[in-house]
Image: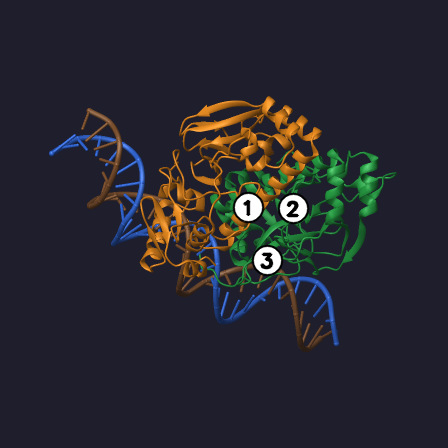
Chain colours: A green, B orange, C brown, D blue
Amino acid sequence: MKMAGRTIAFRSPCIIGIYRPAGQLSQSGPGTRTGYSVPKPNLTPLQQIAYFAGLPEPVLADLEQAAVKRHFEAGQVIYLEGDPSDRVFILEAGWVKAARMSREGREQALAFMRPGEIFGDIAVFIEQPYPATVTALEPVEVWVIPAKDFLVLINRHPELALAVIRRLGRRVMYFIGLVEDLSLRSVEARLAHTLLRNAELHEGRLVVPRRDWTTFDEMAVRLGTVRDVLSRALKTLEAEGLLRVGKQAIVLLDPDGLARRGD
Amino acid sequence: MKMAGRTIAFRSPCIIGIYRPAGQLSQSGPGTRTGYSVPKPNLTPLQQIAYFAGLPEPVLADLEQAAVKRHFEAGQVIYLEGDPSDRVFILEAGWVKAARMSREGREQALAFMRPGEIFGDIAVFIEQPYPATVTALEPVEVWVIPAKDFLVLINRHPELALAVIRRLGRRVMYFIGLVEDLSLRSVEARLAHTLLRNAELHEGRLVVPRRDWTTFDEMAVRLGTVRDVLSRALKTLEAEGLLRVGKQAIVLLDPDGLARRGD
DNA sequence: AATAAAGTACGATAAAAGTCGTATCCAAAC
DNA sequence: GTTTGGATACGACTTTTATCGTACTTTATT
């Protein structure tokens, strides 16, 4: 491993929806994805968020009162690693990326988050600066809640506390998986593995959709490697007929074969 | 990287006290370590645990009532990855290791835990099997609390909920650091980095103590590599006069130099 | 239509990390 | 005092991953 100066990719990643959002869909493996952005009628915005689904009315009311909506353009930084953590964010629309970068400009994605997810909360809980930089990958709408208001709410509502705990637990699980990937799997294996975990079923085919920010660079950042290596790994798998890389999606032609490669 | 069959090290790790326990000592960097195992008079066992320090009496009383004490010998498995998560554990004495292993028998340590720490809690919160295998590194005393009792207690006591949240937050932070290490740092760099973070001040010298289970194998498991590579890295740093590897401890001769190597 | 810019492909090469065989050291057990 | 098993050392070698230069493709811009 030679390590010096991977390119900093600012605009865009990848394939890869990361945390399994709060409520449903905790089974792993490929499956259809129930829409988070599909608004359901007769619900307040917060109720549409999986994270808060099931919370009693008054809790939601309190939350909504404390929150302010904000907008970010694609590529904008929402906060920087090291910033004082005085706010909690709830994503309403658009994807964001949380990543850590070394002095040399190398980058490792910690999470790609989609509507319905919270971020910035952990730093608030433990009263430390934000541990990662969060960037908007697309035009983004977020609710911003001042840190102390959020803490007060958690103290007041045990249900909210438990929801937070569950979410944190899920995050830890996610990171355990990431650690395992980085430590115990080759790039090719974790590529296969990650593709499978993020596949959706479209017209009878298993597919990993690509957004316009889903470049090879961002995919590489997600996997903890660099574009060149990722590109080669994809070529290898493609050559073996396991998948096909398209412009809008990566089609998984042979899930079983991929699973075998994924470990 | 060739990947096939690292040795499974069952008995022992390393250098490496991992999570910063709950209460004090949140400042990073080298420092003296206030004793967790030094019993203070006039306190119930639970009060001596940093995790619960500061919790009101009734909460502690409830906890103690739900808990049962158990003993494990060095090398014994406390639970296996994949076991149903029906219990939460609180360490009273002895060190344990939480690790994940691949089918081929390769292993990656997720945490080394010492007295005062909780484990098994996350799986309980999100109602999934334990994500890692926990092994006793020494003779160990633990309190065991049935999962549902613990959940009830959290619901009942907001203070406990917040304590749990803070602890989970700290865990996430720890894993973020681990991910960064594995992804962005060379073995040598993360060795230097880890040594510094786990150093203690003894007689004016910065020292990382070694227990009898702190073998090179376990250190390697901690760092996400193998014994040979770790050994070489240590030799390199030793040759440069940055440290000295002793039987009871690794002496950090040149912290600044190490810091430079650590990133 | 020409140009620019971002994204991707690929061969050549280098470096880090992992593997293996063997040798040595050391402490506990007999 | 030997024996034995665990732990460590080390050289030779392989594989994986990273780097670099260059060239090609596609999409957007002018």
The amino acid at mark 2 is Ile
Side of A1 where A248 appears, left or right: right
Q: Are marks 3 and 2 in contact (CB under 8 Å)?
A: no
Mark 1 to mark 2 CA distance (whole Å): 12 Å
> Which disc number belongs to residue A122?
2
Q: Are marks 1 and 3 on the same chain?
A: no
* Mark 2 secondary-structure assignment: helix
Q: Is residue A78 above or below residue B10?
A: below
Q: Is residue B171 visible?
A: yes
Q: Is residue A97 above or below residue B120?
A: below
Task: Write down the chain letter for disc 2.
Answer: A
Task: Write down the chain letter for disc 3.
Answer: A
The residue mark sitting in front, 1 or 3, is 1
Q: Are marks 3 and 2 on the same chain?
A: yes
> Which disc number belongs to residue A217?
3
* Mark 1 secondary-structure assignment: helix
The amino acid at mark 1 is Tyr
